[in-house]
Amino acid sequence: MIALLRYQTALLIGSHRWLPPVILYAAWLAVSIRSGDPILDGLGYAAGGLLPAAVWLTRTCVTNEPSAARNCAAAAAGPGRVHLACVLTAAGTALLLALVGTAVVVLLSDPRSTDQLVAVPVVPAALAGLLAALVCLLMGTAVGALSNWPVLRSTGWSIPAGLLAALLLLVLGASPANAAVSGLVTGSLHGTINTPWLPLAATALIAAAAVAAACALSSRRG
């Protein structure tokens, strides 16, 4: 698996297809994060922007390899393991974005509530923000795994499905991603840190099931 991860990482870097989702996330941070804004608001916005970026990165990694090279790797290591390496490469790249986004917010934001009356501890706030980013990262990975090959083979269906799912998961109250992000933004009103442990646990289970299903299907479809 280590060799597969190295191969997929080198393939992603060499293809430069990581640039669009990274630029998308950077643009999101530039628009939504301003110096002196409340820290919890900024962490919520930074986490939310990671969901569509993770969906895009997952699509990039699972469709990046030429068919001939994919078949060779699948013959050597098994199609399920190759697909898992693709998804893990995307998740690792998204994790780097999560760390950078959280650090940018911590450096630029004001560690106080929205009304600037309550001081917010920076380290617990940063932890809550990073966990919220992980929730969005995992949810985006799950969406990317289920909205692309081998689950959906047609680009005409996979891209709209991924975009629509990312939007719905950010705005629907039943979504763990929405719960994690809104918990930070709502907590900012009174300077309360809502650490999203429950959304993270739920999303980890969802992502594990989605990725396992996609890997199993890749073994059947070759």
Image (cartoon, rainbow, N blue to C red):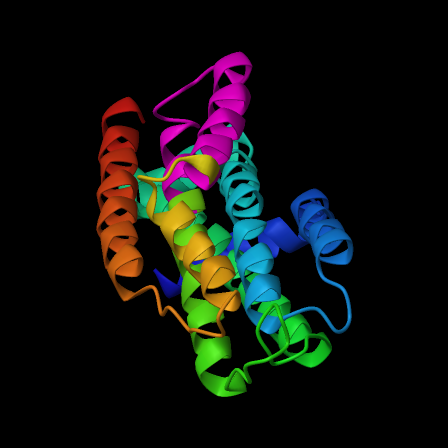
Tell me where the magenta segment starts and ends, as one range: 141-170
| Corner quadrant of residue 149 | top left
On screen, residue 195 versus residue 118, left or right, reads left
In the foreground, 37 or 88: 37
Can residue 162 be found in the magenta stretch? yes
Residue at coordinates 50% horizontally, 40% vertically from top-left?
Answer: 55
| Corner quadrant of residue 26 | bottom right
Can residue 6 be found in the magenta stretch? no
Q: Position of residue 110 (x, y in %)?
A: 67, 78
In the foreground, 169 or 23: 169
SS majority, magenta = helix
On screen, residue 3 versus residue 100, left or right, reads left
Residue at coordinates 41% horizontally, 59% vertically from top-left?
Answer: 183
On screen, residue 179 versus residue 202, left or right, reads right
Viewer can see residue 88:
no
In the foreground, 89 or 174: 174
Could you tell me which quadrant the N terminus lies in?
A: bottom left
Viewer can see residue 170:
yes
State how many labels appear: 0
In the rendered image, the vertical position of residue 56 relative to residue 119, given as above or below: above
Q: Position of residue 206 (x, y in %)?
A: 25, 45
Q: Position of residue 60 (x, y in %)?
A: 56, 39
Q: Position of residue 180 (x, y in %)?
A: 40, 56
In the foreground, 177 or 23: 177
In the rendered image, the vertical position of residue 121 relative to residue 26, given as above or below: below
On screen, residue 26 versus residue 193, left or right, reads right
Residue at coordinates 40% horizontally, 48% vertically from top-left?
Answer: 177
Could you tell me which quadrant the C terminus lies in?
A: top left
